[in-house]
Image (spheres, coloured by chain):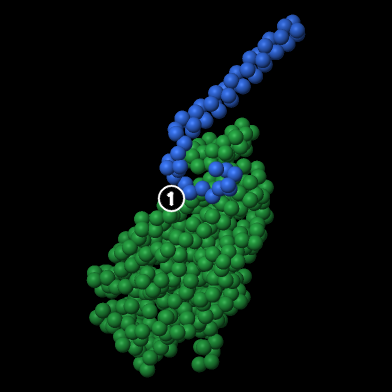
Chain colours: A blue, B green
Amino acid sequence: MYKKLLNVNRRNFNKFISLSLASIFSFNILFFKEIFSKSLSKKNSKIKWVLSEKDI
Amino acid sequence: MIIKKEYLLNKNYEIIICGSGPAGITLALELEKQNISCLILEAGDEFYSDKAQSRYEGEVVGNFPNDISITRLSQFGGTTGHWGGTCRPLDSYDFKDWPINEEDIEPYLNKSCEILEIPKSFGEKNISDRLKIIEFQESDVRFHEKYFEYIKKSKLIDICLNCSIFNIKAKNNSINEILLDPENKLILKTNFLVLACGGIENSRLLLWFREKNKFISSSLPIGNYWMEHPFKKIGSGIGNFNLIRNNLKNDFEKFENFRNWGNFTVSISPTKKTIDEKNILNSAIFLTLHDRDNDTLKNNIKDLLCVAPNLSNKIVKLFNKNLLCGISISSSWEQDANINNKITLSNSKDSTGIPKTKLEYYLSEKTLKTAKEMINEVGLYFVDNDLGRIGGDQTIYDLKNFISDAGYHHIGGTRMGENKYSSVVDKNLKVHGVENLFVCGSSTFPSGGHANPTLSIIQLSLRLANHLAKKINIL
């Protein structure tokens, strides 16, 4: 019985981990998709950034 | 004690103070301690009334953002009835154009902090030789709550509510009569008159008195050099939350969640070296860090990647480590004293028959340059220490269309100085050319620094009380 329970827990844990990784991954994709979907152009910038030469 | 207007007829007071805001009440209480009696004339009631407040209506020309009838309160306690309570003394270099130094009002700082019930702790920490973190204090004192009952019972302080001054009469350049109505029915006698009606009313009343009397010199720049503290969100950024926190760490507890603006707020000010080198005005930058689910962050990443594609890897890494945060940057800064920023008398009159205020207000290149240079200074600090990247909002690069909010800090108009062509009152706050007429409040500041003015107003009031007490004791 104990082993059975352990197996169930392990299965649930694996399922949980894979779901979590998937959600984190998809969240990041969604987050950055919106950012990268628009063409990156200096004209779109609403802020005058203070940058180093390496940034550009 | 409270005295009704009709009982004032032909009364004689050593000192009459117009206005029961922080300047007037502090002055009256300090005089009382020195056993000197006075009368306070308060145009408003004990609490807010539309009738009294309507006298604050006026005309505004230029790019002043506020309605001048709502930025102050006509009631006992004055504008402390709705003030934010933020306090900090002026920096020593703010006194550059003043006829007095920081040392002249520093002895009154302890007592001023006691009145405002704040610790005398205004720390500073240099983060470079160009920038410093500064500490503010927050006061919860409302002068009505703290002092009304006390003054009601005072034997040396009389207060007349709903009573405004209409005119003054003088003999040999010395005021001897105060007229409370246009019909000259209610006349009071006094040895000293102090105007402590606030940063707009002091100018308006003096302009009106000059229109009615020849003994106030036409050369005095009454109403001129009027200033505010521009207050606006001027920039944004993104950064490494932990790095910023550690780098800008300080002992000033107030900065933890200051005013609930965000997760972490820090106030940064230029050092004297930066002010001199860049030829800018004094300033405070409020840098607030936001959670990663805040819209600011997403928008700022979008914007930054438009101009700095090489930062994309770094941004993704920080984001995955949950360390990326959005930054919003607000600022409250000094405005330069400009003779053309002025209070004059409008063509329409208030309910007492005195012309209403007309305010002409413009922001200068130097004022806007200060905001731009400060963004640049803080931005370079972020780059050098790799804390993140910040930038200025496009609005601060367009003087013509720039409209800032304001701190409701009304400064200048009756500025202090030795020259009667460029100032209205002398270093003891006495109006040039009139023996016993004084002005107290931020209207006497020749420059405003960036600090909220109430603490300095109270320091000046205590100093004036000492000066008047000495004069009375000599007489």
Q: Which residue is mark 1?
A: B394
- In the image, what residue occupies the spot 62% across and 42% down? B240
Q: Residue furthest right?
A: A2
- In the image, what residue occupies the spot 49% across and 57% down? B372
* Image mark 1: chain: B
- In the image, what residue occupies the spot 52% across and 30% down? A32
Task: Estimate the x, y position of residue A23 in percent, counting from the top left.
Answer: 57, 22
Q: Residues within 10 Å of mark 1 (few under 14, many from 20)?
A: some
* Image-quadrant location for residue B343: bottom left
Residue B258 seen anywhere in this rendered image of the structure:
no
Task: Estimate the x, y position of residue B73 in percent, counting from the top left.
Answer: 39, 63
Rendered view: B365 above or below B244 = below
- In the image, what residue occupies the spot 41% across and 52% down? B395
- Is B465 on the left or on the right of B383, as rendered? left
Quadrant holding the N terminus of chain B: bottom left
Residue B27 seen anywhere in this rendered image of the structure:
yes
